[in-house]
Each structure stands twice: as structure tokens, then as C-alpha cells.
């Protein structure tokens, strides 16, 4: 399947909710100081699944893991052990059933494999991070992994930072990667630069005969790497709606309501007995409320209370996102303004 990769710097239109799963890829270069930004990225692009490379998280950093996980999502962490840097994580909606199969440990790259089970399709998300530097026996190890994956899985997405300049036709590593992918009939879908230096090093792959990937777009990221959005041909699961029953007080005509109260037995013939009068109040007012503000039932979305989210915080969030567009202008002055104001936010 030919990929429909396009370079775009515009925000995803979130007014129309996608009917299919949306997968994202980010190289974070430390999520610790970008927790709010990454949560905003997930919400802004209405993601179902986000793979992150270079999390720089330690295995015991539960605080950052909690802050980076939006409500209604799961966080699956694969930190780099015994060394700083690196690390892989996947954040996915908790209505997606998944397994984390055991995979071999490789010396030349980090890997996390998740098997996603949807009612209409089962597929795998493979996240990979290869550190910069000599490739060593990377192609041998990656080839071994592809052989296992292709023999056990029909639908998969391989995504990550490979630190191989796929845009350079003369690059030896790029040639070896293209040859390896051809041998396994795997397509690489990213055709636009994903790094500030203009190279394609963050990749998205799938089987040549697979229809799993609908489109791939390169967008603003959160570091010196761009982000990647992938539309998958997997229908979203519809959450069971929360039904809410209430009186339509907004439709209540106060004048007519008051007239009916005045003409009711509550005012015309009120009881002198306290218990009977209380019963009159309950019966008359209940009947009149049902008449003037009839009961209706609607389905609503269940959202957690966010009493801390004030209008000032909302405005500050919008301003921060606007200042982050320095990555679009590439101007030093814009970045300095962003850094200074972020320190005071």
C-alpha cells in the first residue's frame, strides 16, 4: 500500500472526532520536563496510542509516569536499565485491550512490543530506539527480529527513532535498511524530514500487503524531532454512553409557573395540618415542575472533575502552545522568548 505522507504544520482538526484509531510517535529527549506538553499533544491530536522514544525515565520514577498519563489512559514503560538516557514508553487508552509479549533482548536497539486486541482487528505496535553512532551488528539483530515478527504477526506497525538517514540515497546504512525492508516486503512510510537537521530518522513501517496504515503525517514535535501521526484502519470502540435524566428548567416559563402555583390548592385551600400541608407542597410542586420543566434523558460523556482548571490556566496553556511554535520559525529569538516565559509559568 502506498503511503500518503505529507508535511504539515497545521493543528489537527479536532472538531470532527476520528472514526478510526490515531497513533502518534514522539522522540521526547526526556519526558520529565515535558509532561504537560505531551499530555497536551495527546489531547490536541485526539490520540488513541502514543509511542515515545528517549523517555529518559528511570524505572522508579512513578511521579513522572503518573503526570504524563492523561485520565483514561494506560502507561507502559520500558526504561533503559543500568544506564542513563534512552527508554521507551507507550501511552494508550484504557478501552484498548493489550498484551505485552516477551521479546528478545538486543544489544543494538531498545524495543517494546504490544499486541492490541480490538473487536475488528488484532495488530501489534512495535516501538524501537537505536542510539546514534556506529550500527555494529544492528542489521543482523533487526533482521532476526523481523523474521520472528513476520512469521507470527500479520498486522503490525513498527515505529521509532532509528538514527539512520533514510533521506540520503548514498548513505550505506540507509541502503542496508532499504534492502532489509525489501527482503521482508515491509514499507517505510515517512518521506519528510523528522529532525531539525533535515534528515528522516524517525520511521513508521508496515507490511507491504497490509491495509493497517491509512496515512502518515509529520507534525510539530516536542524536541528537536518532529512528531508523527498515523491514521490506522481500525475502527474506534464506542464507549457506552452515560445516561443522565433531569428536568429541563431552562425551558421553564416563570410567569406561567407562578400563575399555576397561585391557582393551586396550595394557595387556594392550604391545609391547617402541618403534615398534610407538607404533603400538599410535595404533590403540587412536583406536578407543576413536571408540567413546566418536563423530564428528559440524554447521553453525556463522563469526564473527571477538574476544579483546578481555571480560566487563567486555560489562557496560559494557549499562550504556551503558541510560543512553542518557535520550532516552526526556527528563530533563536522566538526560542529565547519561549524559554524565558516557560520559566515563569
Image (tube, rainbow, N blue to C red):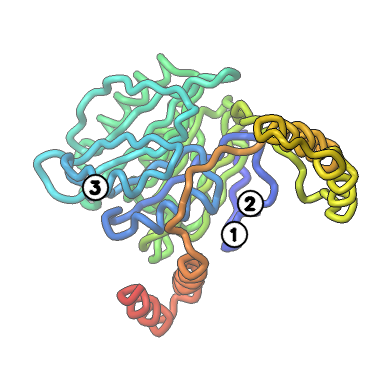
Q: Nearer the viewer, residue 177 or 122?
A: 122
Residue 264 higher or lower than 193, as above or below: above
Q: Nearer the viewer, mark 1 or mark 2?
A: 2
Quadrant position of the N terminus in the picture: top right
Of the residues under marks 3 and 1, which one precedes in the sequence? 1
Instruction: List the residue tagged with mark 3.
Output: 63
| Mark 3 or mark 1, whichever is nearer to me | 3
Disc number for residue 11: 1
The reply to whether the C-beta atoms of the residues labelled 1 and 2 are less than 8 Å apart is yes
Left or right relative to 251: residue 273: left
Mark 2–mark 3 distance (CA, rounded to whole Å):
29 Å
Q: What residue is disc 2 on?
A: 14
Asked if one can make out residue 39 in the rendered structure from this viewpoint, the answer is yes
- Could you classify mark 3 by the number of other residues whose Cα lies within 10 Å: few (under 14), some (14-19), or many (20 or more)? few
Q: Which residue corresponds to the image point at 47% horizontal and 34% vertical from the top-left? A: 93
Residue at (66% x, 43% y) in the render: 17
The percent coordinates of residue 202 (x first, y second) are 40, 49
Q: Are marks 2 and 3 in contact (CB under 8 Å)?
A: no
- Looking at the rendered structure, the secondary structure element under dot 2 is loop
Judged from the image, the secondary structure of the residue bearing numbered disc 1 is loop
* Callout 3 secondary element: helix
Amino acid at each position: 500500500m502506498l503511503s500518503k505522507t505529507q508535511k504539515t504544520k497545521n493543528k489537527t482538526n479536532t472538531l470532527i472526532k476520528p472514526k478510526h484509531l490515531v497513533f502518534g510517535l514522539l522522540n521526547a529527549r526526556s519526558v520529565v520536563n515535558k509532561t504537560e506538553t505531551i499530555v497536551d499533544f495527546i489531547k490536541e491530536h485526539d490520540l488513541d496510542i502514543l509511542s515515545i522514544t528517549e523517555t529518559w525515565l528511570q524505572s522508579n520514577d512513578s511521579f513522572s509516569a503518573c503526570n504524563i498519563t492523561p485520565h483514561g489512559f494506560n502507561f507502559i514503560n520500558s526504561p533503559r536499565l543500568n544506564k542513563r538516557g534512552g527508554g521507551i514508553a507507550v501511552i494508550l487508552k484504557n478501552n484498548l485491550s493489550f498484551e505485552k509479549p516477551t521479546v528478545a533482548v538486543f544489544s543494538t536497539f531498545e524495543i517494546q512490543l504490544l499486541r492490541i486486541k480490538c473487536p475488528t482487528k488484532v495488530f501489534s505496535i512495535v516501538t524501537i530506539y537505536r542510539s546514534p553512532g556506529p550500527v555494529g551488528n544492528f542489521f543482523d539483530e533487526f533482521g532476526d527480529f523481523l523474521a520472528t515478527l513476520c512469521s507470527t504477526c500479520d498486522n503490525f506497525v513498527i515505529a521509532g527513532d532509528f538514527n539512520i538517514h533514510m533521506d540520503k540515497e548514498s548513505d550505506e546504512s540507509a541502503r542496508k535498511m532499504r534492502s532489509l525492508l525489501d527482503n521482508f516486503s515491509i514499507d517505510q512510510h515517512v518521506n519528510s524530514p523528522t529532525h531539525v537537521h533535515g534528515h528522516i530518522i524517525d520511521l513508521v513501517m508496515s507490511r507491504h500487503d497490509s491495509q493497517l496504515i491509512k496515512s502518515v503525517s509529520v507534525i510539530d514535535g516536542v524536541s528537536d524531532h518532529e512528531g508523527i501521526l498515523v491514521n490506522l484502519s481500525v475502527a474506534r470502540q464506542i464507549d457506552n454512553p452515560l445516561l443522565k435524566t433531569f428536568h429541563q428548567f431552562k425551558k421553564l416559563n416563570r410567569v406561567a409557573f407562578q400563575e399555576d402555583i397561585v391557582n393551586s390548592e396550595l394557595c387556594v385551600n392550604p391545609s391547617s395540618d402541618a403534615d398534610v400541608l407538607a404533603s400538599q407542597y410535595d404533590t403540587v410542586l412536583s406536578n407543576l415542575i413536571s408540567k413546566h420543566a418536563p423530564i428528559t434523558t440524554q447521553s453525556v460523556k463522563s469526564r473527571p472533575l477538574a476544579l483546578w482548571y481555571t480560566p487563567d490556566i486555560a489562557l496560559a496553556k494557549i499562550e504556551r502552545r503558541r510560543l512553542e511554535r518557535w520550532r516552526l520559525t526556527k528563530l533563536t529569538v522566538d526560542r529565547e522568548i519561549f524559554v524565558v516565559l516557560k520559566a515563569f509559568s
